[in-house]
Image: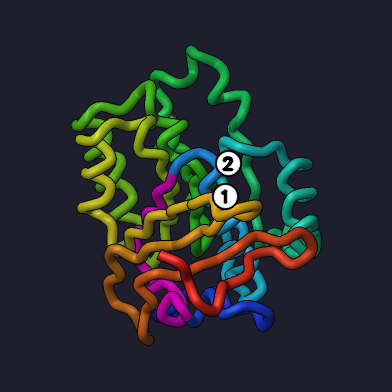
Amino acid sequence: MSAIRSFEIPRDEFNGKLGGGFPAGSLVVIEGGSGGGKSTICQRITYGMIEEDTSVTFISTQLTTKGYINQMYSLDYPIAPHLLKGRLLYIPVIPLVQSAKSRIDFIERLMGAEELFEKDVIVIDTISSLIKYSANAEKSLDLISFFKKLNGMGKVIILTIEPSELGDELASMFRSSCDIYMSLRSKAMGAEVKRTVIVNKFTGAKGPVGQMIGFRIEPKVGLVVEIASVA
């Protein structure tokens, strides 16, 4: 098993700026407000990983399967071959998020769904939307220890969080228990939005890790790392 899960693609330096990839067995938390770029970051990392022959399950509260495929192709991340080969498993949970009844016991259901956790990497975008109705401190701890158990098997778990959906106590539980913690910041500058990944914590990096990585999202190009990031 590779010690580092790289998500290198030739046309951007994102993987290089993040130490050359995530160490196997990492719990990664990506935090940001609505529209901050969390999903695009996850899409970029997922594409890089499946291109490097790492299998990924992507659980999304944001997009239907068709919407996800269209979004990936609009960023020039062609994923159809990976979906067909089973290297990428995409699970939309929009109906689940909208149905009140299923939200209450969602954490238990998530932990019971073994087939979701068979791949090398599991992305849940956004975990806060899924658990905001069923999460209390005790259940969140159960979920975190469940993720840690998967980390112990070498799996990388990537969670995106919108802090306003969880409240301070639960959000800080996820922050303090993860190995890699990144927050996203967006700032309108004239006609464009300056986006920055702030790396707050990165345990076990193989190479140097940038503290602040400026990026933009371009149609047909995907994620572009800015040469000079604007704080």
* Residue span colored magenta: 17-32
Q: Report which residue position mark 2 lands on.
A: 60
Q: Percent from the top left, x then y, of residue 79?
A: 75, 61
Is 149 part of what is drawn in magenta?
no
Within 10 angstroms of label 1, few (less than 14), some, or many (20 or more) residues?
some
The three-letter amino acid code for the residue at tag 1 is Ser
Which residue is tagged 1?
39
Q: Which residue is drawn at the image coordinates 40% and 64% (left, top)?
A: 231
**Secondary structure beneath label 2:** strand
Question: Quick check: can you spot residue 1?
Answer: no
Depth check, front residue: 181 or 118: 181
Please report the residue visible at 54 percent of the width from the left and 50 percent of the height from the top: 188
Which SS class for mark 1? helix
The spot of residue 145 in percent (x, y) is: 25, 47
Quadrant where the N terminus sits is bottom left
Instruction: Name the residue nearer the viewer: 117 or 27.
Output: 27
- For marks 1 and 2 on the same chain, the one whose residue lies earlier in the sequence: 1
Cβ atoms under marks 1 and 2 closer than 8 Å: yes
Colouring style: rainbow
Q: Position of residue 202 (x, y in %)?
A: 30, 70
Q: Amino acid at mark 2?
A: Ser
Judge whether residue 173 can be spotted in this image.
yes
